[in-house]
Image: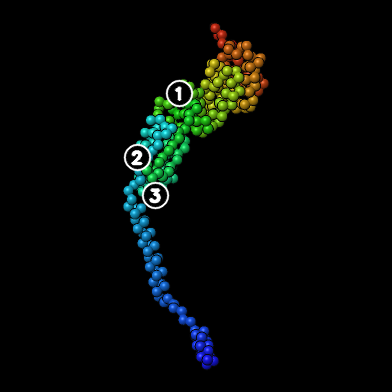
Amino acid sequence: MAQTVNEVTDLMSDKADRPKTKRQVPTALKYFFMVLVLGLLVLILAMGGKALRDAPPAAIYVSNKGLTVTQYRSLQQVMNQQKVSSFFTSDLQALRDIATSLAWVDQVSVSRDWQRGIVITALPKQAVANFGTERLVDAKGVVFIPADNKDLTQERFATLQGEIAQAPVIMQQMQQVNDWYAPLGMQVEDIILSPRMTWLIRFDNGLRVIVDNENTAQKLLNLSQLLGNQLKSRRDEMQSIDLRYKNGFTIAWNVSQSESDESK
């Protein structure tokens, strides 16, 4: 019995001492699989790229939301002339730049839509005044040509005149003057800034005011206060006021036969 136990122990000991063998994948086979996987990836990418290149041009959809008929047609005509690639590869920024190049366009949004294609949504500039007779100007002082010529020289707008580069300054001046003279029931109808920086302002009640570029704001503010107090009773008799003086101003009065100047 002891001998049998010893034999079993010896056998177990031999199995424990026997080295374990590992099956290793040949290096060549590893490289083969790596090359195969990389090849498949390259093939997939190449096929995907070819599919994108061969895809039909994306449709361009121009939204008419917030646009007049003329504005919509103008934007649609420009977009129809653009050559676009596929739905995924079209350059949205380039399309946005083209749309914003239209003078009357303020903001543009370009997006991809599965059903409609590339969607162009534009917001037009909102005119608040005429600039000369051939342009309009928005609240920020940006001068532009409208999509429809019928929008030019609108009677409900004041008219600004001067250099286009000075449009923001003229717009700001008009807004300030309107604020000062609103309590008097007066609004600017025309405002001109000459090359010599002289201001000519005509109000809706017919009064004309001339002022130079020296202390312009203070002179106009002081005048509004005088017209609302000391000169209130004679405001309707005034034709024009010249503020181009350091120590006063002149008034041209409305008279039946002739005009006379009175220094103040």
Q: What x and y, as percent, mark residue 52?
A: 36, 53
Q: Nearer the viewer, mark 2 or mark 1?
A: 2
Which residue lies under the disc numbered 3?
A: 88
Label 3 neighbour load within 10 Å: few <14, some 14-19, many 20+: some
Quarter assignment of residue 175 = top right
Residue drawn at x 40%, y 32% is 71
Q: Residue at x 52, y 22 (%)?
A: 190
Query: Considering the numbered disc 1 on the image, is that residue within a helix, a strand or a loop?
Result: loop
Kind of element beneath mark 2:
helix
Instruction: Please state the horizontal and vertical placement of residue 27, each as a whole percent of the image.
Output: 42, 76
Spatial CA span between label 3 and label 2: 19 Å
Residue at point 54%, 92% (across, down): 2
Q: Is residue 177 left or right of residue 78?
A: right
Instruction: Work out whether residue 185 or residue 54 is closer to the camera in this orientation and state it.
Output: 54
Q: Amino acid at mark 2?
A: Asn
Is 16 located above or below residue 180 in the figure? below
Question: Which residue sits furthest top?
Answer: 257
Question: Which label number is shown at residue 80?
Answer: 2
Name the element at disc 3.
loop
What amino acid is at disc 1? Gln
Q: Position of residue 138 (x, y in %)?
A: 50, 30
Of pointers 3 and 2, the one earlier in the residue sequence: 2
In the picture of the structure, the residue carrying the numbered disc 1 is 154
